[in-house]
Amino acid sequence: MQLSHEELEEGAVFALDFDKLAKVAACGQALVPVAVQDADSLEILIVAYANREALEYAVEHGVAAFWSTSRNELWVKGATSGDFLDLVEIRVNCEQNSLLYLVRPRGEGACHTKKEGRARSGCYYRSLVDKALVPID
């Protein structure tokens, strides 16, 4: 089922992209997943990917940085929106194949989608109820 950008990001249809990891692998970069969590509220804000360049940028500049698998370029969260995620801590999992960024948001939110003109705090703003997506914010 092909959904429009609006339907995908704001709609009630549950349509997971089960091909996402194949797209990530096809981008040609060596990547690890990064879970991004608000250091104070503990809300999970984003799941993204980082390559060495993104991780080095994050460490050097103290802000969340990723590799955009759709644009195939360094993505510094907040560089265009102003909604930076200041790094508090970077953690690595036991197998050293994923990262956790603990952050403090600087700006309106972390998600690129908007509610009433403002960035949402995080990307997990809908709940699955009876096979449909229901807004929780």
Image (cartoon, rainbow, N blue to C red):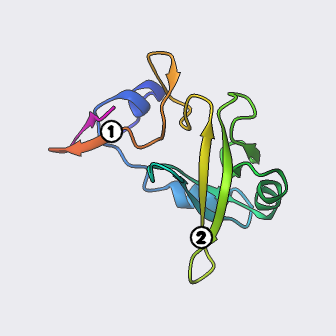
How many numbered marks have been drawn onto this rendered protein structure?
Answer: 2
Q: Mark 2 points at which residue?
A: 98
Residue at 48% of width from left, 40% of height from top? 122
- Residue 1 horizontal/vertical position (percent): 35, 39
Region in magenta = 132-137
Residue in the foreground of this view, choosing between 56 and 105: 105
Crowd around label 2: few <14 · some 14–19 · many ≥20 (10 Å) = some
Residue 68 visible in the picture: no
Q: Name the residue under label 1.
A: 126
Snapshot quadrant of residue 70: top right
Is the magenta region chiefly helix, strand or loop?
strand
Mark 1 element type: strand
As shown in the figure, which amino acid type bears the numbered disc 1? Answer: Arg
Q: Is residue 134 magenta?
A: yes
Residue in the foreground of this view, choosing between 129 and 77: 77
Which badge, 1 or 2, comes first in the chain's sequence? 2
Q: Does the magenta stretch include residue 84?
A: no
Q: Is residue 64 left or right of residue 118?
A: right
Mark 2 element type: loop
